[in-house]
């Protein structure tokens, strides 16, 4: 008899989603409706019912954290039967795995390097320099954004059709061609390539497509509303044989169009996959009724949505607070006072979040919290693997792993200092270009031909000899990747460089390297560690200690807190003016979805606020309350005393048709707000 305990705690729609195994399925999962439970239970059910072996299930998420949580939950249900779920991971990690198996089809070797943003920028800068492109006029980040957009649309350089209205694309396309060839020469990929190359292989090699399409009897996709064109195309190619694709998501939480996400993938799912069954999960298990009512009322103003009605078994709870402040500084004081006097008595700091539309908003909160000694953390700041000392260590390991990694070579050849200056590096670059060699091979040839200046020759010879020794240590002595890094740090002089300069920053860097060595213990070998570093995402944050959490609403997606503060609800800031100017109604609806995401992060208390004036980029700017505030249901709101005072004293001022006021009276922004709500 099959034990089906995992079905006991599911409501009827959840159970239906778990048990429906044949054909395409779209699960419209509202905020806090238990979609992860449904996905993991569905995987367990497929295996228990012997519909597929674990390695015949493809389960795709957007973050490493989500993938790990899913793996743990399935293991808790199935125990040892979950062993073999080898195709559970992020889009990028699974594509990297596929690409390594078929690297030659993309003109790569299987040990290709996955480069990060810093490496991309350096590569683009080098190309621009060679092509006489002024990076002050055409920023490398902008060039990469256009290239990434082309890759998300599924275009290799030869396939791009230039948009004649875009004055920059004509200049950027030749750079894309050079950039892509350089990546091939370096035996490297950027993140966009991982999916693009994989899709092209599946499109161009029917035998490879047949293998995977046949093997993956079931495909499950989390957060489907956040997929872009190339991700959707990849899934479509892999599901051609069995058609058992199940996508879970919430169109009301589609907030990533700025990075290529296309909500139409979700809205038109049933048009792409015939005989799609749609199941709605409308039972919310996270938020109180008042919070849910406010969020639902707000999002109902969007027209471009599948539509659902969320309900909750939770109590009504506290009313959602709506606070008005004179300025941004008062807003920060008001939030800190609320936490000090009321919130921290009932909730830990870790369960409190301040969610902002733009990261600059955190400055006033940081200043206030530092002044009163309230602990806080900024999520979405510098990530561990993006710290300079960590990138240096990883660059050493990358170059040891494969000699073609010119970007790693550039970073560490003179780090620590070895008298290899810019002019020597320039000579090596020119020689490598003429001889069609990577930088390491070019350096060796130049040393053999005595083409390096005497002072630099000593340092370069030491560096090349060290690389050879470290590679031999890894192969012949079978050193672990952890021991290898310790040897590299000692023999390269990197550790001595940090230890010899006694200051707090260098002490912190040494502590970070210790943390890196500790983190490496979780991986079996150097290759798996380097893969992890390449695919690490912003969700991997430090949560140690009791601290109030500050982050953007975008960064808060997928998280939940007992108490959520939502400051800065003002026109131009939220909804953001740029979003409306660039995308019109679509932009406004995405901003409203972002507001919905922000509110639904709260479990017990939600506090929305706006200020009449805000100090921004050196100037005081009069503010007008966000149009979203008008869309909040009055019966679920509690307004602060300042808000009421302003309304009660409305006869203190007059305004003309242009909403102007005499000097010394209240904020024009506040007056405009009063005019609008009437």
Image (tube, helix red, strand yellow):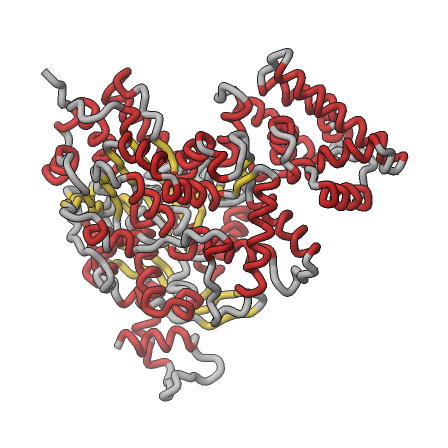
Q: Is residue 205 above or below residue 81?
A: below
Residue beneath the point at 33% across and 81% down: 651
The answer to which of 407 and 251 lies nearer the viewer is 407
Q: In this view, does 317 lie above or below 82?
A: below
> Image quadrant of residue 71?
top left
Q: In the image as oriented, which residue stretches furthest toward the right?
A: 454
Query: Can see residue 14?
Result: no
Is residue 477 left or right of 446 when viewed as pictured?
left
Q: In the image as oriented, which residue stretches furthest toward the top?
A: 477
> Image quadrant of residue 130?
bottom right
Residue 512 in the image: state x and y as whole percent.
60, 30
The answer to which of 282 and 652 lies nearer the viewer is 282
Q: In this view, does 389 lie above or below 164?
A: above
Q: In the image as oriented, which residue stretches furthest toward the bottom?
A: 656
Residue 166 in the image: state x and y as whole percent.
50, 69
Locate the C terminus by quadrant.
bottom left
> Image quadrant of residue 49?
top left
The answer to which of 179 and 484 lies nearer the viewer is 179
Locate the N terminus by quadrant.
top left
The answer to which of 47 and 296 lies nearer the viewer is 47
Residue beneath the point at 17% across and 42% down: 314
Q: In this view, does 651 lie above or below 399?
A: below
Residue 181 in the image: state x and y as whole percent.
58, 47
Residue beneath the point at 70% across and 38% down: 437
Is residue 202 left or right of 19 when viewed as pictured?
right
């Amino acid at each position: 008899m099959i034990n089906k305990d995992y079905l006991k705690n599911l409501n009827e729609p959840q159970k239906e989603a778990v048990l429906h195994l044949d054909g395409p399925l779209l699960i419209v999962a509202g905020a806090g409706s238990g979609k992860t439970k449904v996905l993991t239970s569905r995987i367990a059910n497929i295996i228990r019912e012997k519909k597929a072996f674990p390695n015949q299930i493809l389960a795709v998420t957007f973050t490493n954290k989500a993938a790990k949580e899913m793996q743990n939950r399935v293991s808790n249900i199935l125990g040892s039967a979950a062993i073999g779920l080898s195709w559970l991971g992020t889009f990028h990690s699974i594509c990297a795995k596929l690409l390594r198996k078929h690297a030659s089809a993309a003109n790569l070797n299987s040990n290709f390097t996955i480069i990060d943003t810093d490496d991309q920028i350096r590569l683009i800068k080098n190309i621009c320099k060679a092509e006489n492109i002024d990076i002050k006029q055409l920023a490398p980040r902008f060039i990469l954004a256009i290239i990434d957009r082309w890759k998300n649309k599924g275009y290799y350089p030869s396939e791009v059709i230039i948009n004649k209205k875009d004055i920059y694309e004509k200049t950027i396309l030749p750079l894309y061609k050079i950039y892509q060839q350089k990546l091939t020469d370096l035996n490297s990929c950027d993140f966009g390539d991982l999916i693009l190359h994989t899709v092209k292989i599946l499109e161009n090699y029917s035998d490879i497509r047949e293998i995977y399409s046949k093997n993956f009897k079931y495909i499950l996709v989390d957060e489907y509303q956040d997929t872009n064109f190339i991700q959707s195309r990849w899934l479509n190619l892999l599901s051609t044989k069995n058609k058992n694709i199940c996508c879970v998501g919430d169109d009301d939480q589609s907030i990533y169009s700025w990075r290529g996400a296309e909500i139409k993938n979700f809205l038109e799912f049933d048009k792409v996959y015939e005989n799609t069954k749609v199941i709605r999960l409308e039972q919310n298990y996270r938020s109180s009724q008042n919070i849910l009512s406010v969020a639902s009322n707000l999002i109902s103003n969007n027209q471009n949505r599948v539509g659902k009605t969320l309900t909750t078994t939770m109590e009504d709870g506290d009313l959602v607070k709506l606070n008005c402040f004179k300025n941004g500084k008062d807003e920060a004081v008001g939030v800190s006072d609320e936490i000090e006097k009321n919130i921290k008595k009932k909730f830990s700091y870790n369960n409190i979040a301040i969610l902002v539309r733009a990261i600059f908003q955190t400055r006033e909160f940081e200043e206030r919290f530092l002044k009163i000694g309230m602990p806080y953390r900024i999520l979405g700041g510098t990530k561990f693997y993006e710290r300079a000392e960590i990138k240096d260590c990883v660059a050493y390991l990358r170059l040891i792993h494969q000699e073609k990694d010119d970007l790693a070579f550039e970073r560490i050849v003179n780090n620590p200092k070895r008298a290899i200056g810019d002019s020597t590096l320039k000579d090596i670059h020119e020689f490598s270009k003429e001889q069609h060699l990577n930088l390491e091979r070019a350096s060796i040839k130049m040393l053999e031909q005595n083409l390096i200046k005497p002072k630099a020759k000593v340092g370069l010879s030491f560096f090349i000899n060290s690389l050879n020794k470290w590679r031999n240590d890894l192969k012949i002595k079978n050193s672990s990747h952890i021991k290898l890094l310790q040897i590299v740090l000692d023999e390269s002089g990197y550790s001595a460089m940090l230890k010899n300069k006694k200051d707090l920053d260098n002490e912190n860097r040494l502590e970070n390297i210790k943390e890196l060595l500790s983190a490496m213990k979780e991986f079996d070998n150097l290759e798996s560690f380097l893969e992890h570093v390449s695919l690490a995402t912003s969700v991997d944050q430090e949560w140690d200690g009791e601290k109030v959490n500050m982050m953007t609403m975008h960064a808060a997606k997928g998280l939940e807190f007992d108490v959520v503060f939502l400051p800065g609800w003002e026109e131009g800031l939220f909804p953001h003016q740029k979003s409306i100017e660039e995308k019109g109604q679509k932009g406004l609806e995405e901003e409203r979805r972002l507001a919905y995401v922000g509110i639904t992060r709260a479990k017990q208390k939600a506090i929305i606020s706006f200020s009449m004036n805000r100090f921004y980029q050196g100037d005081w700017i009069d503010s007008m309350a966000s149009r979203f505030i008008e869309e909040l249901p009055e019966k679920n709101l509690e307004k602060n005393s300042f808000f009421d005072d302003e309304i009660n004293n409305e006869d203190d001022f007059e305004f003309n048709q242009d909403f102007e006021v005499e000097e010394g009276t209240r904020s024009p922004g506040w007056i405009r707000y009063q005019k609008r709500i009437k």
